[in-house]
């Protein structure tokens, strides 16, 4: 992998983003009022769009099994027919355990890879890791973009690396994490999004969850707009995954509103929109039960993941 | 990398965004239970509401139901109101120290904030604007205006040039429109009170109710009787105010044709005049603009408040190289705008203010079609009752089309293209109006050079329809003269001639105060009512 592979590479031309106006648009979208049936439908949809995540140094087989069970039966106490989540998201060594736990169900196994979260390793090692988690049975692979290359202006390298990671991921869905908290400007987010999409990302994802700020509304808006423009240019529908910091149902509904109003109905599906979160699921369930019963029940009825 | 290889390069028509019903928002009505309205209200004169001989209904444009009846003023009513204002002015208000006036104005601002929800709901009921806008824009700005001018009241000597103390004018006749009923009342009343004038205000006939609630606040705030008087009715009542001999200043916000009449009426009289009239604002989008935000700015420029905005960006000038992209994005964007009941929290475009205005919009849109412009409207279901018009834009518009020249005052945008910055300026200035414009470019130097070349009172860079009480607002050409807001907004309500240049004369009846320099902070022996410390 050297620059001679693609001597004519030019970074994509992307529109500039006005930060103040983008923030305002995101704020405006956050004022949508989601009530009654719309709320119930939205919350149920969000469960199916959830990448239930555990990415800790302290993760053990027991913890991952527990998470998988939660992913399959989010509300064991309830007589309600709640859907299972979209995927469980784990570190590479946990893929096989998760695979066993969710075998034969709709729940996918997602693994982070490519030396998550920093990505500071030789490309060969990162490619190798992607192949390993693919072979271990990951349906989805969340790789980190090389911010070292991006922030030093080596866009060609960023593009080429993602392309190689995409090839290595095979049939698994490739989600490219931009780590927007390290990119800082919306212009950089827009450019990184476009490079990742051009290089073969199936999804673009905001954050690892290890850096603050993680997902924000305006950053997600800018990424959704990149996805929209790419679709209108090429017909290809790339997915979006905000991750990190989305802890409550109200915030999650705001992201869903944004997807609905920027990209439309075709993206209101777990195939094209995911939220990466560890503690969101129980708040979704709490709010659903509140809509059903008219009051909040105790958190002791919510099982831990 | 599972799907991308299969991405087909299909025809453009296949690449539409679908804003359908996969996830519909449920109704989210704002409760109106806390809005208390009497069946009828008369004129507010001398601190009291007075019965009238004749009443007219104020209806909700969304439902056509009568909300309350309002007393129609006669010439005699106007005369009583002006007399009350004169008495209040002469007897104490003009001599009250600025710091005392400020307390009343602060108090009014605070009470508006306390009752902001009620004001917002009533404004949406009476005028048809979405609750999101009255809640997030109108009412907060109303309170901000009172707070801002309360701060000026005791600093007038430092605000304006000259060694003398600026002096108030006397009785101000103020006539306001229906598009921002309470906000326009605040723009008029707050600087008038801060400068020591008294007021006779006439709200628009279709939107009198929030001004009535404001009058109730004036009562509660203990504002001395007669300092603010409010009369209701149509143009004839406005004319009676303008013509009244004892009015010292007229401030009018409304249509250019009425503004011209007023200026003719006042020619040769002693009365001071400010006019804030129509506009046909240009929203100029250069190829180096942040396109997605610019599209949002187009929407804010023309679909805000159903387009009932004198400074609306009703002419889109877009550089030809990005025109197709901008128009496509605009098309997508307006299909997500929600037209519907003003009190639904998710409504983006509410009801057209009146039947008359709806007819005017329809007439001009017909003209646009007949003249050969291409009309685009998204599909939207409009309620059966009430007055509604979907967001609309015209392409293939030239400067010679009527829809590019006349103010429509509705959610109707005309789109034209330009090739170079010079051409953009030329086209933007090619109008009888000169109120507001927007410029969209990522290049700071371009924002400044273009804004210097535009003949407009207000120019927004990479934003649109932003208001702040500290920022002066007003027009060039047939958009009027005089500025409202900020320190500039004090000037139309003051005489700033230096005292040392004036011969000593006895105070005349035209309201010039008999104060001497230096007594502006004295509490004096006069029996002036004082605001309590609050």
Image (cartoon, coloured by chain):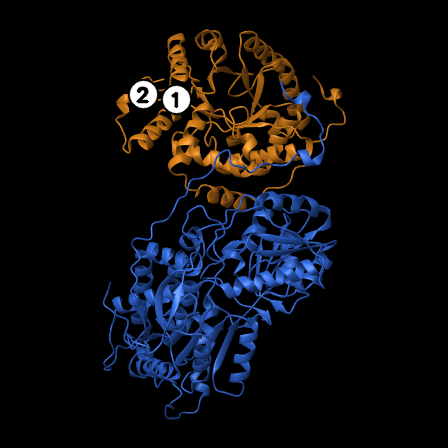
* Chain (orange): A
From the viewer's perspective, tell me whether residue A271 is left or right of residue A230: left
In the picture, which quadrant includes the C terminus of chain B? bottom left
Q: Colour of chain B?
A: blue
Give the tally of numbered discs.
Answer: 2
- The reply to whether residue B462 is in sight is no
Label 2, label 1: how many angstroms apart (C-alpha)? Answer: 9 Å
From the viewer's side, name the closer residue of B180 and B205. B205
Q: For residue B456, which quarter of the picture?
A: bottom right
Q: Give the chain of mark 2.
A: A
Q: Is residue B501 visible?
A: yes
Identity of the residue drawn at 37% across and 12% down: A66
Would you say B390 lies left or right of B371 here? left
**Disc 2 target residue:** A78
The spot of residue A226 in percent (x, y) is 61, 34
Q: Residue B169's x, y, as percent?
A: 41, 81
Q: Which quarter shows the N terminus of chain B?
A: top right
Q: Chain of mark 1?
A: A
Contact check, label 2 and label 1, Cβ < 8 Å? yes
Which residue position holds label 1? A82
Residue ranking furthest to the bottom = B505
């Amino acid at each position: 992998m050297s620059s001679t592979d693609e001597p004519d590479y030019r970074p994509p031309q992307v529109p500039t983003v006005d930060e103040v106006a983008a923030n305002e648009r995101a704020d405006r979208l956050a004022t949508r009022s989601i009530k009654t049936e719309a709320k119930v439908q939205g919350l149920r949809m969000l469960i199916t769009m959830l990448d239930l995540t555990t990415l800790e140094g302290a993760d053990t087989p027991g913890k991952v099994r527990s998470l998988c069970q939660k992913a399959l039966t989010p509300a064991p106490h309830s007589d309600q027919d709640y859907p299972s989540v979209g995927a469980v998201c784990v570190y590479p060594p946990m893929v096989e355990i998760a695979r066993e736990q969710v075998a034969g169900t709709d729940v996918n196994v997602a693994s982070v890879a490519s030396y998550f979260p920093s990505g500071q390793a030789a490309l060969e090692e990162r490619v190798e890791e992607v192949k390993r988690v693919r072979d271990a049975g990951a349906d989805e692979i969340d790789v980190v973009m090389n911010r070292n290359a991006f922030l030093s202006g080596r866009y060609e390298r960023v593009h080429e690396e993602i392309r190689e990671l995409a090839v290595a991921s095979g049939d698994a869905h490739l989600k490219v994490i931009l780590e927007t908290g390290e990119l800082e400007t919306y212009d950089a987010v827009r450019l990184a999004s476009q490079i990742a999409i051009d290089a073969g990302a199936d999804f673009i994802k905001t954050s690892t969850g290890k850096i603050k700020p993680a997902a924000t509304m305006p950053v997600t808006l800018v990424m959704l707009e990149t996805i929209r423009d790419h679709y209108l240019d090429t017909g290809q529908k790339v997915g979006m995954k905000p991750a990190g910091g989305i802890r409550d149902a109200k915030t999650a509904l705001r992201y869903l509103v944004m997807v609905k109003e920027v990209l439309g109905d075709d993206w209101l599906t777990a195939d094209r929109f995911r939220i990466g979160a560890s503690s969101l699921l129980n708040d979704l369930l709490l709010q659903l039960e509140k809509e059903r019963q008219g009051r909040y029940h105790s958190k002791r009825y919510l099982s831990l993941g | 990398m599972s799907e991308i290889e299969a991405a087909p390069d299909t025809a453009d028509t296949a690449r539409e965004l679908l804003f359908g019903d996969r996830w519909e928002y449920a109704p989210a009505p704002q409760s109106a239970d806390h809005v208390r309205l009497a069946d009828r209200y008369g004129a507010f004169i001398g601190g009291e509401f007075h019965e009238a001989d004749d009443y007219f209904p104020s209806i909700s444009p969304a439902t056509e139901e009568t909300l309350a009846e309002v007393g129609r003023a006669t010439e005699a009513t106007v005369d009583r109101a002006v007399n009350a204002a004169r008495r209040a002015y002469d007897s104490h208000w003009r001599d009250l120290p600025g710091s005392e006036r400020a307390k009343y104005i602060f108090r009014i601002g605070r009470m508006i904030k306390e009752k902001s929800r009620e004001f917002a709901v009533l404004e949406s009921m009476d005028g048809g604007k979405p609750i999101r806008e009255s809640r997030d824009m109108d009412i907060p700005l109303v309170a901000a205006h009172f707070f801002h001018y309360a701060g000026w009241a005791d600093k007038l000597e430092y605000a304006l040039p000259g060694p003398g103390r600026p002096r108030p004018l006397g009785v101000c006749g103020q006539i306001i429109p229906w598009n921002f009923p309470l906000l326009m009342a605040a723009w008029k009343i707050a600087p008038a009170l801060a400068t020591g004038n008294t007021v006779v205000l006439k709200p628009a006939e279709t939107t009198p109710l929030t001004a009535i609630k404001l009058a109730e606040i004036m009562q509660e705030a203990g504002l001395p009787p007669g300092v603010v008087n409010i009369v209701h009715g149509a143009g004839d009542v406005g004319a009676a105010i303008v013509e009244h001999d004892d009015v010292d200043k007229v401030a009018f916000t409304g249509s250019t044709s009425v503004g011209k009449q007023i200026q003719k009426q006042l020619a040769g009289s002693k009365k001071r005049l400010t006019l804030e009239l129509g506009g046909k604002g240009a929203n100029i989008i250069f190829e180096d603009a942040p396109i997605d935000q610019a599209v949002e700015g187009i929407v804010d420029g023309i679909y805000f408040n159903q387009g009932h905005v004198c400074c609306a960006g009703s002419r889109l000038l877009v550089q030809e190289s990005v025109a197709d992209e901008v128009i496509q994005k605009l098309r997508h964007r307006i299909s997500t705008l929600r037209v519907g009941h003003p009190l639904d929290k998710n409504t983006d475009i509410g009801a057209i203010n009146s039947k008359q205005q709806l007819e005017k919009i329809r007439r001009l849109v017909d003209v646009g079609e007949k003249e050969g412009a291409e009309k685009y409207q998204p599909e939207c279901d409009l309620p059966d009752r009430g007055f509604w018009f979907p967001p609309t834009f015209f392409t293939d518009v030239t400067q010679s089309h009527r829809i590019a020249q006349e103010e429509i005052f509705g959610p109707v945008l005309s789109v034209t293209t330009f090739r170079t910055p010079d051409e953009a300026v030329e086209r933007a200035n090619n109008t009888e109006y000169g109120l507001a414009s927007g410029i969209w470019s990522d290049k700071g130097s371009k924002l400044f050079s273009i804004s210097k070349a535009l003949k407009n009172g207000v120019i927004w860079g990479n934003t649109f329809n932003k208001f702040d009480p500290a920022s002066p607002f007003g027009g060039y050409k047939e958009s009027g003269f005089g500025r409202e807001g900020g320190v500039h907004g004090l000037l139309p309500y003051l005489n700033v001639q230096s005292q040392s240049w004036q011969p000593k004369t006895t105070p005349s009846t035209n309201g010039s105060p008999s104060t001497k320099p230096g007594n502006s902070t004295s509490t004096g022996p006069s029996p002036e009512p004082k605001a309590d410390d609050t």
